[in-house]
Amino acid sequence: MAFNPLEQRGIPVEEQFRSWSELSVEPLDKLGDPYTRCRVILMNGIEVESILFAHQFARATDDLDIRRALALGRRIDQQQRAVVNNLNPGDQSPLETTIGYEQVAVDLTAWLARNEPDPALKQALDFALLEDFDHLYRYANLYELIDGRDAAELTDSLTEIMPGRPTVVEHRHPYDDVRPHYDTHTVDPLSRLHVMTIVAAEQQTMNYYLNHSAELVEPVARDLYVEISHIEEQHVTHYESLIDPLDSWFEQLVFHKYDEVYLYWSMLQQEADPRLKRIWELHLEMEIGQLHVACDLLRRYQGVEPEEILPPELPEVPLTFETNKEYVRSVLAEQVDLRADGTGYRPLDELPDDHRYFAFQGIVNEGGTPSEAVVDEIRVVDGRDFRDEVEGPHPVAGLRA
C-alpha cells in the first residue's frame, strides 16, 4: 500500500519528549537475531547523522527561530538515539560490536547496490562493498586470535566471512576518493535515500573505529583499527561526494527527515521482535511529526512546497537486511582487481606505472600492514586463517585458502 508521510499526522514535536525511565530499555541478546542487531546499529548511525547535520545547520544561520527549531529537533533525536543505542548489549565487547558494524556494512551496501537504479551510484556501492567485506574477514580473524571465538556465532553465517578486496590494496590517494555527484533535479528519489543512508552508516563506522582503537590492549588489534579507520574515512569521502551540494540547508533538512521516515518504516516492516516493533513504530510517528516541522521551515523561509522536492509516496520496497551471499560473490568475481582512478575506476593492470596509487601505497604500507599481520599471526597460531565460506570455495582463485 502506498505510504505518503506528508498525509500522515504523526506525533506533534511538542508531545515527543520522554522521561529518563522511558529511555531505559532492555538490551538485546548479543547472540540473538543478527539482523535485529544490524537494524539497531544502522538506526543509531542515522540518528547521529541527523544530530550532526542539525548542528552544522545551526552554525550556518543567525536566525533565532531556525536555531530554536533545530535545537528542539536535535533534542528529540538525541532521545531517540539513546533508546536505539541502549538496545546494544552491555556484555558485547568493542570487537564484537565491530563485527556487527561490518555485517551491517556488507549487507546494507549489497542490498542498496542490488536495488540502485543509477549505474554510476551502483558502481560506487559495489566498489566499497568489497572493501567492507574484507574488513569483516580481518576483524573475524582478530576475534579468533585474541578472544579464541568464532565470529560466525555473531553473524549466524548469514554473511560469509572470507577475503574481499584485500585491505592492504585499498589505500589510495585522497584525490581518487572523490566521485561525481548526482543532479538533485533529476536524481531518482530512491537513489537519494540510498546515498544519504550509506553516508550515515559509514560515518558511524568511521567514528567508532577512530574512538575505540585506543581501548584495545593488543598492539595487533590497535594497529588494525587504525588502518581500517583510514579506509572508513575514505568511504565517507567516497559516498558524501555523491550528494549534490546545491541543495539548500532547508532542503537537506527535509531530505534527512524523509530518509529517517523511510528507514523507520522499513525497520517496522521486517522486525519480528514485538518489543522492537513498538520502538520502530513510535519513532516512525515521531519522525513524521519532525518531517512536518522541516517542511514548514522550507515553506516559510524558501517559499517551496515539500511536494515540489519529495516523491508522492515512500518507495514500494522497504530497505531490508537479508543475506546477500550470491550477490557479493558475483561482485568479487568481477571487480576484486578494480581500483579508483580519478572520478572513475580501472583494473589494476591498466593503471600506468607512475599512477599516484602506487606512490601512496609505497608510503603507507612501508614496513608492513596490520591487516596482513593479523592474518599472518592467526595462521602461525592455528595453521590457517578464519573463514566462514558456507557457499563453497572463494570465487577468486587467488584468494582461496
Image (cartoon, rainbow, N blue to C red):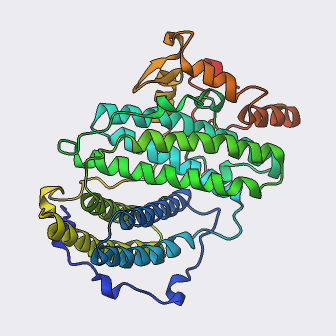
In percent of width and height, residue 91 lies at 71, 68
In percent of width and height, residue 260 lies at 35, 63
Inspect this view and state whether residue 386 appears.
yes
Where on the picture, by quarter, is residue 380?
Answer: top right
Between 255 and 68, which is closer to the camera in this rendering?
A: 68
| Residue that extends furthest to the front in the rendered view of this protein | 62
Left or right? Give the position of 84 relative to 135. left
| Residue that extends furthest to the right in the rendered view of this protein | 381
In percent of width and height, residue 395 lies at 56, 24
Which residue corresponds to the image point at 45% horizontal and 38% vertical from the top-left? 238
- Count up the numbered dots: 0
Left or right? Give the position of 299 relative to 273. left
- Quadrant of the snapshot with the N terminus: bottom left
- Quadrant of the snapshot with the C terminus: top right
Inspect this view and state whether residue 323 appears.
no
Between 123 and 249, which is closer to the camera in this rendering?
A: 249
**In the image, is residue 229 above or below residue 329?**
below
**In the image, is residue 328 above or below residue 269?**
above
Between 332 and 310, which is closer to the camera in this rendering?
A: 310
Which residue corresponds to the image point at 54% horizontal and 89% vertical from the top-left? 21
Which residue corresponds to the image point at 76% horizontal and 58% vertical from the top-left? 215
Which residue corresponds to the image point at 62% horizontal and 20% vertical from the top-left? 359
**In the image, is residue 77 above or below residue 146?**
below
